[in-house]
Amino acid sequence: MPEPLLITPTELRQHHYCPRVVFFERCTPVRRRETVLMTHGREKHQTELLRERRRTLSRYDLAEGERRYDLRLTSPALGLTGELDLLIVDGTLAFPVEFKHTSRPPDPGHKLQLCAYALLVEAELHLSCPHGYWHSSRTRQTHTIPFDTRLRNRTRAAIETLRGFILAERCPPPTPQATKCLECELRNFCGDTL
């Protein structure tokens, strides 16, 4: 029996940004080279996780909770696998946390990514995730992301859409926002953008 196709919450975010990113990584021999911005972001991410270990839970409006870092989760039933930055557990409730090095507020792709982690936590750890947190290391702002029915449905639909593109090995259309292509490390492979 073939292994189920598992995608990551990060791929959901990338797919929302530009559907072709995941297509090139999964369906072609093209490999993304790490850009200076990607390296810098990864380094800032690690620094933020180290700082987080020294902080209280007050930024999350939580009085108590157990922190679990770099939590690896897999659910064949959901078709998802990934490593969550931080999970705060308080009894039967859990709150996934994502750290990003950006000055922009969370966009719909970030919300899909965080909700996918919540679905994984609920499926694998049998904890309830009413909402999660998205923290910007640049602005020091923490946003609460509610996992309402609409976001959960959008996340499940995005998982199926992405799995369909990968299984069909069909190149999706480019992002309608051509300015995203200007700094894309995969721009040379598209052929029909800028």
Image (cartoon, rainbow, N blue to C red):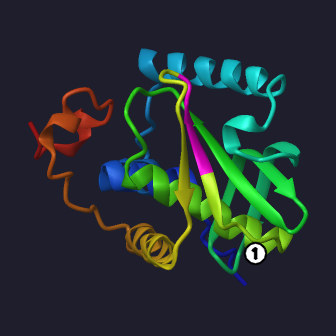
Instruction: Tell me the kind of residue under disc 1.
Output: Ala
- Residue 133's place in the image compared with 142, above or below, is below
Question: Residue, x 43% and y 19% (percent of image)?
Answer: 37
Q: Quadrant of residue 3?
A: bottom right
- Residue 40's place in the image compared with 53, above or below, is above
Question: Residue, x 14% and y 52% (percent of image)?
Answer: 176
Q: Which span of residues is magenta-colored?
A: 133-137
Question: Residue, x 70% and y 66% (percent of image)?
Answer: 129
Q: Nearer the viewer, residue 128 or 5?
A: 128
Q: Position of residue 100 (x, y in %)?
A: 53, 33
Q: Position of residue 23 (x, y in %)?
A: 38, 55
Q: Nearer the viewer, residue 151 or 183?
A: 151
Q: Main secondary structure of the magenta part?
A: strand
Q: Position of residue 65 (x, y in %)?
A: 87, 49
Callout 1: SS: helix
Give the total number of marks visible in the rendering: 1
- Residue 152's place in the image compared with 54, above or below, is below
